[in-house]
Structures are given as structure tokens and as C-alpha cells.
Image (cartoon, rainbow, N blue to C red):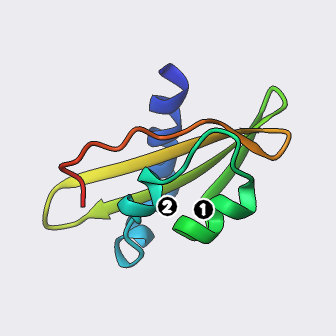
Amino acid sequence: MRFLRLLMILFVLTGFAGEADAKKINWEGMRQIKVGMTTSDVVKLVGKPLSITAVNGKLYYGWASYHMFGGGVAVVSIEFTDGKVTVAPVVPEELK
């Protein structure tokens, strides 16, 4: 959980969130991601990530969306090991 918070802070501080407004997160696609899917499967569903981070032999693909007038930042991170999803995102139904 700390890692995900750190990842979110890094998105905001490096400006990824600001440019992501024009490219909203594809929540429906995120809901379809399952453990075992490949990186290319995920990119086909939700588009290219804004960042890719390597930590301890795992890759983390990250997407962010900043809503200038809505006042919020949404960040999604997906963990991959050996090119396959090991932790799929849990997306609340309220996000559309």
C-alpha cells in the first residue's frame, strides 16, 4: 500500500497527472484485466501506460487522470512479473 501511495505522489510531482486529463483512464477496460494477462493484452484493453517502473524484478505500469475542475486525481498501477499480471486492479463501480 505504501508503494502505491508513493507511486501516486510520483505521478503528481512529475507532471504525469496534468497531461493525463486529455487521456482519461479507461475504467471499463481496467475492470477486464485479470491475473495472468500479458502486458500487450493490457495495453490493448486500456492503452499505453503513462509510466513503467521496475522494482525488485517486477514491473509496474501506471495510468493517471487529473480532473482540473473536478478536483481529483485517479491513479491505477498494475503489477507484472515475467510479463504477466500478478496483481489486477480493483475498480469501484462509481468510476466510469
Q: Residues within 10 Å of mark 2 (few under 14, many from 20)?
A: some
Q: Earlier in the sequence, mark 2 or mark 1?
A: 2
Residue shown at 64% from the left, 65% from the top: 43
Residue shown at 48% from the left, 54% from the top: 32
Q: Which residue is mark 2?
A: 16
| Picture quadrant where residue 24 is located | bottom left
What's the amino acid at mark 2? Phe
Foreground label between 2 and 1: 1
Residue 81: x and y in percent read 79, 36
In the image, taking residue 38 as reference, residue 79 lies left or right, namely left
The answer to whether residue 1 is above or below residue 92 is above
Q: Residues within 10 Å of mark 1 (few under 14, many from 20)?
A: some
Q: Which residue is mark 1?
A: 49
| Picture quadrant where residue 90 is located | top left
What's the amino acid at mark 1? Pro
Helix, strand or loop status at disc 1: loop
Residue 92: x and y in percent read 27, 42
